[in-house]
Image (spheres, grey):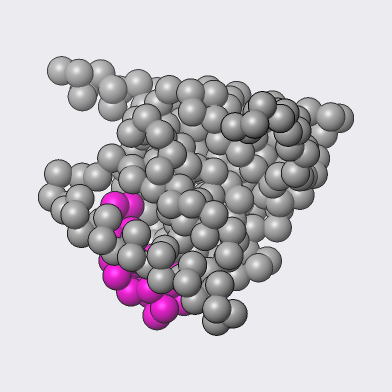
Amino acid sequence: MFQKLRNWRISRIVAKHPIPEPLWRAALARCAPARRLGASDQAALRVLATLFLREKSIEPVQGLTLDDGDCVLLATHACVPILKLGMDWFDGWHSVIVYPDAFVPRRTRTDEAGVVHESSDAMAGEAWGRGPVILSWNDVLAAGQRPGHNVVIHEMAHKLDLQNGAANGFPPLHRRMDQRVWTRVLSGAWERLRREHHQGVPIPIDPYGLENPAEFFAVVSEQFFEAPAALREHLPEVYRQLALFYRQHPY
């Protein structure tokens, strides 16, 4: 009964608030991971993007204006990772705050000696535990311009990771996935790439992924969807684990 009511609700939302065909076609043209999907998966993604636009509040700030097409594009990027997972994986948060460009969150921390340090690094995106996703619109528009980069997918990967309560590179795995294999593969790849990068060896991912296991998961997730062939070539075991988690094979 619950599933029938849920399907009825989804059908009602899609019928009442459809994404216009021109806006959907424009979003596909600007989102390579979505464009590569087959027709049935594109239709499923369109439903998810419709739900995303109804359930999440997209809030431009600092004078930025986003039109309907911009919002459809953002929702399309955001829903690529949950194509085979479903909207439930985005439960617990409600808003996407969008800055015109890189933003500078002001944070302070106190070290062991009691000295207060203030951070002022410019950021392209951020995901809070039970709070919003924050994005730079210029970086959203730059998705795919550098191989493997997509700030929206990056931050949504953090949101999936946070479903376990902490961003640690260990999202809730599916029943038939082996936690020990996940840990061995992703931790092993992260540690090996850190050593190679320290030794000056070129690595096949954005070095930002070496910051910590959470960033590694988000960075390889970006590459999984934006440059799957390269990820599968250079980190085949990581690709395999992500394919099991996302239940997709983009390459």
Magenta stretch, overall SS: helix
Would residue 148 appear left or right of 119 to someone viewing this image? left
Would residue 190 appear left or right of 248 to someone viewing this image? right
How far from the left and from the top, in percent, is residue 80?
45, 50
Q: In which quarter of the image is the N terminus?
A: top left
Residue 31 sits in quarter = bottom right
How far from the left and from the top, in percent, is residue 179?
20, 50
Q: Name above or below for residue 196 compared with residue 5.
A: below
Q: Nearer the viewer, residue 88 or 239?
A: 239
Residue plotted at (37% across, 67% down): 189
Give the number of marks: 0
Q: Which of 114 and 195 is in front in this view?
A: 114
How far from the left and from the top, in percent, is residue 240?
28, 66
Queried whether the magenta region covers residue 38, the answer comes back as no
Residue sitting farthest toward the front: 113
Judge whether residue 179 can be spotted in this image. Answer: yes
Would residue 137 appear left or right of 165 to someone viewing this image? right
Judge whether residue 81 can be spotted in this image. Answer: no
Q: Name above or below for residue 116 compared with residue 77.
A: above
Magenta stretch?
Answer: 227-251
Queried whether the magenta region covers residue 233, the answer comes back as yes
Q: Name above or below for residue 128 compared with residue 168.
A: above
Q: Which of 218 and 226 is in front in this view?
A: 218
Residue plotted at (35% across, 21% down): 9
How far from the left and from the top, in percent, is residue 8?
30, 23
Q: Nearer the viewer, residue 97 or 200?
A: 200
Residue plotted at (33% across, 52% down): 246
